[in-house]
Amino acid sequence: MTTNEIPPEGSPGLGAVRPAAMSDRSFIATWMFAWLLGFLGVDRFYLGKIGTGVVKLLTLGGLGIWWLIDLILTLAGVQRDREGRLLPDYEQHKMIAWIITAAGFGLWLLTAAISRAFVYVPADWPMMPWWQGR
């Protein structure tokens, strides 16, 4: 076959792009596991990556770094299962996953800032009796 010929249908030819096989695992489940239980490696176990799941469990998500990387990989749509297949429902659920994750991190930052502000409250500041432990 020369470069000017069109390859027959169904046969891989020059420049032919094969559709990637999609995983039977769910993007939503992977994202929720990565976000809420990723420090325990549950997302890795769900994707069939048992070895790295155990390592992630024993290191508590790589002290949080591996947890964050896996969450970002999942949200970016490049997380794959054990066979190297992409998660099928990423395109239809990515926006809501990003919004909920951003809202969760925003809420975490807000509560951390409020908690930190109470460190600077004087001990003799008038408070409710139940707050002071009376």
Image (spheres, rainbow, N blue to C red):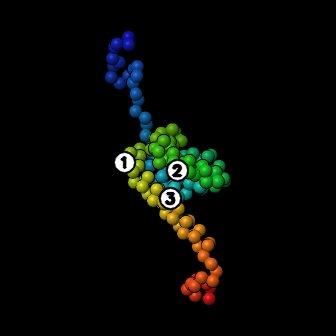
Q: Which residue is mark 1?
A: 92
* SS type, badge 2: helix
Q: Residue 28: percent from the left, percent from the top? A: 44, 52
Q: Residue at x 61, y 73 (%)?
A: 120
Q: Which residue is mark 2?
A: 71
CB atoms at circles 2 and 1 under 8 Å apart? Answer: no
On-image quarter of the C terminus: bottom right
Q: Nearer the viewer, mark 3 or mark 1?
A: 3
- The amino acid type found where label 1 is placed reads Gln
* SS type, badge 1: helix
Which residue is farthest right?
A: 58
Residue closer to the observer: 123 or 76: 123
Decide if residue 65 is in sight here: yes
Q: Residue 84: percent from the left, percent from the top? A: 51, 38
**Distance between mark 3 and mark 1 Cα atoms:** 22 Å
Q: Residue 8: percent from the left, percent from the top? A: 33, 19
Label 1 neighbour load within 10 Å: few <14, some 14-19, many 20+: few
Q: Residue at x 55, y 86 (%)?
A: 128
Question: Tag on residue 77?
Answer: none
Q: Which badge, 2 or 3, is on the more N-terminal residue?
A: 2
On-image quarter of the N terminus: top left
Label 2 neighbour load within 10 Å: few <14, some 14-19, many 20+: many
Decide if residue 57 is in sight here: no
**Residue 77 position (above or below residue 38):** above
Q: Which residue is mark 3?
A: 105
- The amino acid type found where label 3 is placed reads Phe
* SS type, badge 3: helix
